[in-house]
Image (cartoon, rainbow, N blue to C red):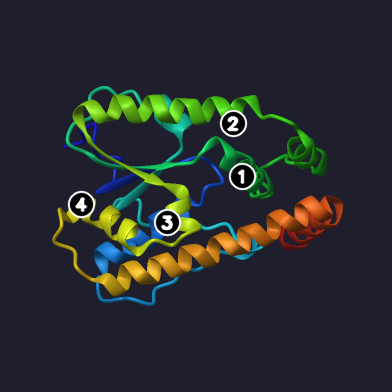
Amino acid sequence: MKTSHADLGLINVLFMPGASGTFLANMLARAITDPWWDDYSPELPNEVFEITKEYINQYNHLAMTWHPFDLKHYDSTYDLKNVNWINLVNTKDELEFTDVMANIKRQHFEGITKKDILDRLYATSNVDYNDCHNWQHEAATMLRVNNNVLDINWSDVFVKGDADVILSMINHLFKGQYTTVSVAENIAKKCIAKHKADLHTYNELKYDPDKVIDNILDKLSTIQN
């Protein structure tokens, strides 16, 4: 029987676009299905996604990914009960980085041009993105009334690679029964590596955006043709 829970995962990750929540969800899902696989690393799905190291999560039934604006249009937001959520929280200072990452990783979207990317890169403020961040706080507050919401600092996962924090996310589902520390440590290591790769792209964009964007779009054009 289809219910309001039918399109949710065992764990649901609420995160800002560009904050690598899909990568994290992929690793959490694998930790759930294969708790002995302590060197797992997600694979890039195809050549298009390889250009900017953009990942997908093929395990949504285990760890479902949600952006704040997606949840805003989910009719059953107020009806959900006893669902496990991870709220991946960015500080205001971190939003500029995640916004740039979300921007450049739109290269595979239909109709995106170099001007679109540059305009957003050079913008002093992205009102829509900031509104999305504000809505994330509101949505998490609403969900917290009838659901199990665990707030996690983005920096603890991707900058610090805190294995204890990552283990707490897994145990949000397993209620303290998940004890494979090596899996949590592997996730921590892979999340740091993912962030460093994004940080490299970010620095290149800031230093020579025209060259980086031209290279990305040229590669994309070659693949699509």
Asked if the residue at tag 2 contacts the one at tag 1, i.e. Cβ–Cβ closer than 8 Å, the answer is yes
Q: Earlier in the sequence, mark 2 or mark 4?
A: 2
Q: Is residue 72 above or below residue 102?
A: above
Labelled disc at residue 173:
4
Residue beneath disc 3: 24
Tell which of 123 and 68 is nearer to you: 123
User: Residue flagged by tag 1: what amino acid is it?
Assistant: Ala
Amino acid at dot 2: Tyr
- Where disc 4 sits, the SS reads helix
Residue wearing tag 1? 102
Q: Earlier in the sequence, mark 1 or mark 2?
A: 1
| Numbered tag placed on residue 129 in the rendering | 2
Q: Earlier in the sequence, mark 2 or mark 3?
A: 3
Along the viewing direction, whichever of 103 and 2 lies nearer the viewer: 103
Say what amino acid the circle numbered 3 marks: Leu
Query: Label 4 sits on what residue type?
Result: Leu
First of labels 3, 4 by sequence position = 3
Query: Would you place residue 144 above or below residue 47 in this image?
Result: above
Find the distance from the CA under tag 3 to the CA under tag 4.
15 Å
Determine the residue positioned at 46% across, 37% down.
Answer: 67
Q: Spatial distance from mark 2 to mark 4, Cα to Cα?
A: 30 Å
- Find numbered disc 3 in the image and state the secondary structure of the residue it sits on: helix
Disc 4/disc 1 C-alpha distance (Å): 28 Å
Q: Residue 118: where, in percent of width, then height? A: 80, 41
- Callout 2: SS: helix
Against 136, residue 186 (above or below) is below
Q: Residues within 10 Å of mark 2 (few under 14, many from 20)?
A: some
The quarter of the image holding the N terminus is top left
Q: CA distance from mark 1 to mark 3?
A: 15 Å
